[in-house]
Amino acid sequence: MVPALVAWSVLAWLIGESTRHLLVAVLLASVALTGTVVRLAQGAAGAPTRRRAARLVGLLALTSLSVMVVCGAALGQRAVDRAGPILDLAAQRAVVQVTGTVLTQPRLLSRGGQGQDQVVLRIRVDRLEGRGQISTPSAPVLVFADTSWADAPWRSQVSTGGRLAQPRDDDGEVEENGDVVAVLTPFGAPVLERAPPRVLRAADVTRDRLRAAVGPLPADARGLIPGLVIGDTSLTPPELTEAMLDTGMSHLSAVSGSNVAIVLGAVVVICRASGVPRRWRAPLAVLALAGFVVLCRPEPSVLRASVMGVIGLAGLSASRRSSTVPALAGAVLILLCVDPNLARSYGFALSTLATLGLVIFARPWGDAISTRLPDRASLIGDAIAIPLAAQVVCAPVIVLLQGNIAIIAVLANLLAAPMVAVTTIAGIAAALGATLWVPLGTAVAWLGAIPAVWIGLVARWCSQVPWGQVEWVDGGSGAWLLTIITVLLLLTGPWLWHQAGAHPLAAASVLTLTAATVLPLPGASPWPPPRGWIIVACDVGQGDALVIATGPTSAVVVDVGEDPEPIADCLDDLGVTEVDAVVLSHFHRDHVGGLDGLLAQADVSAAYVSPTQEPPVEARRALDLLSRADVPTYPLGQGDRLIWGRVSATVVFPQPHRPIYGGSVPNNASLVLDVTSGSTRILLTGDIEAEAAALVRTVLRGQRFDVLKVAHHGSANQDEELVRGLGASLALIGVGAENTFGHPTPSALALLRQSGMTVKRTDEDGDIAVFRSGSGLSVVTERGG
């Protein structure tokens, strides 16, 4: 397994780098392989020391070969993807005619009324015509289109005219589709050139009818059954998705290796019960697996789950466990050769690590637990060991994704796991029944509804358990720290267990001290914050609302969110009854919709607004509310300066009467404020996009700040030079949980962290209060951060 892990790590490190880096890795690996082969040829079997050295050299040779193969595969794929004139045409933003195969299901990007909705999908370009050239590349391209593309059939061939462009590194969609070589903006609807293969069309009929069949079921069952059977999570309630993430159960809500193992296990049991000869069982299981893959669509994630499910199922068999680690290593290398971009896929990492945990730890841990239980309860050992092994090994990656450790995950998975098999099998039967007659599918689906509802109840209940999740160090450092601790515990576990049995009082004292250090006191709440806060980012959902203290009960409010209640509650918690000024950065509803809540909660002395009254409906509503409340209102422009006691603000942007027409006009008309409170300097950026941010950068060049209010809720459309040049140590993001925009995007978060900023976001932390202490800035959050 070591060669596969090393090769995987090298590829993950280099996959985003230039072709030259990959080529150097291949050359170095080939040199190392040659050297180790020569050393093996020179060394002969003999003394034990020599044999051990030969084994070590053999391991190095296998590692070098693995690195050379996966990096060579990445080089080959990159050469194929970039062949032909497509890169040059993208650099020239050429208008082209494209014929391509749809690689992903079209996904709707809702703009929430702030612009036209878009559809994003990926195609493989099969024919390209532009600038007098005709070529037949095989290049992956990301398509941003209008809603006429929403029904483009998966694996169909379509043609369209459009404009090519180079992918932008700061675009979250491009980052998620890291192998694309260009971005295409079509001029119209796609023309269907070739329908998908018949087997896929038949699978689509079954998928559609399953969705129809689960329509009458309760909401949780209606979402979970399609997720488990066909990998479609679009019907899952957002709050259930959040609960399953919090409890480490998210792998249960979509197709994963466990579902594959369930399908294979069910086929084997049915064959055995019906007397099918042993020689036919394996072919029937493979046939059933192929049908399941087609039903779920043979995308990389499903194929990966299939491979890991087969290996994981084999790993639980004592007779096959010795061969499963080499099989897993081989599967990792094959998958990385087929799709090198899996090297940076969190899904691939979680699947591989979970399978590794099952293969190495599940059986011995299950046996160890079972020996301490009565004979009739021996199966409980495996039931506990399987989720425990997977959770322990996957925990560092989960921390990287979520920033916390789900202590409740093992219990949650233990309670839900028995129902997953029932739900999956009933769901498959419902899909087959619905293909014949939708009411028949509905009747069968009800058999899976009760266990599916139980899974939902477990997720919701466990997500509310106190201390179910423990906050952890954020980012890569937190993942590495947990990895080191996990490895140390695994290596010293038996010794620690023995010492705990020999010295129970000392063990209890250590556990109590650890719990007291890590867990919060019962009933203790960090909110509302103590006096002395400088600025508070209020949790108003998908929007912004910032409160800057100007006195014990007075403040300046910048933006007010979309709804009246959250901003009113935030001010009430903070004890603010007088608002020296409300500043509305721009007139999108998620920044001005809660204005009536502010006016009802506190006395407002003045209002300052963007000079661009777009969108006009929201602008008129906000200005009318201020007028009826007798609040004097003033537009601001670049260079204006405002002072409220110890707080001052200078308007950095925009220039009056000179709106930017690139990107979103309202967003790029946002007021950008340079705020100083005592010795703390804060930059508030509204929702500016890259076009406006570039101008802001020229104004602020060389100036340093302590706090950055991140633009546009952490969208991908950031100006990297601006962010990196601010020198801020803290970034605040006002963003709503489960928002449809994907905010904050991975690229924005990576940029902020690489710029040395601690990131606090309202969707995870709730209200966020910033203080100035002798050692610098400190933060208190509503949810205990």
Image (cartoon, rainbow, N blue to C red):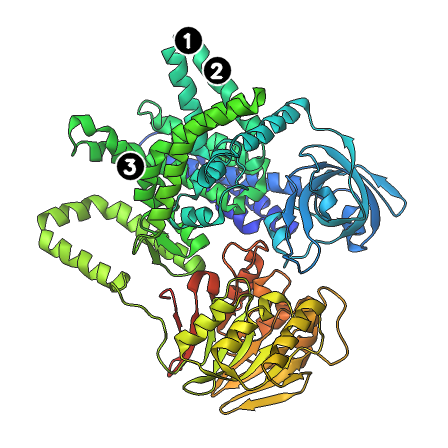
Work out whether residue 41 can be spotted: no
| Labels 3 and 2: the sequence-earlier one | 2
Q: Is residue 128 above or below residue 634?
A: above
Please provide percent x and percent y for residue 322.
35, 27
Q: Real-space Cα distance between discs 3 and 2?
A: 29 Å
Q: Is residue 743 above or below residue 660?
A: above
Residue at image position (21%, 29%) is 378
| Labels 3 and 1: the sequence-earlier one | 1
Please provide percent x and percent y for residue 511.
19, 56
Give SS at disc 3.
helix
> Which amino acid, by three-letter code, is at mark 3?
Ala
> Which amino acid, by three-letter code, is at mark 1?
Val
Residue designated by label 3: 385
> Where on the picture, by quarter, is residue 354?
top left
Residue at image position (46%, 47%) is 241
Q: Between 390 and 320, which is closer to the camera in this rendering?
A: 390
Q: Is residue 239 above or below residue 432?
A: below
> Which amino acid, by three-letter code, is at mark 2?
Leu
Work out whether residue 579 can be spotted: yes
Please give the label number shown on residue 284: 2
Please give the label number shown on residue 646: none
Q: Real-space Cα distance between discs 2 and 1?
A: 10 Å
Please provide percent x and percent y for residue 460.
37, 47
Q: Between 53 and 234, which is closer to the camera in this rendering?
A: 234
Q: Are discs 2 and 1 less than 8 Å apart at CB?
A: yes
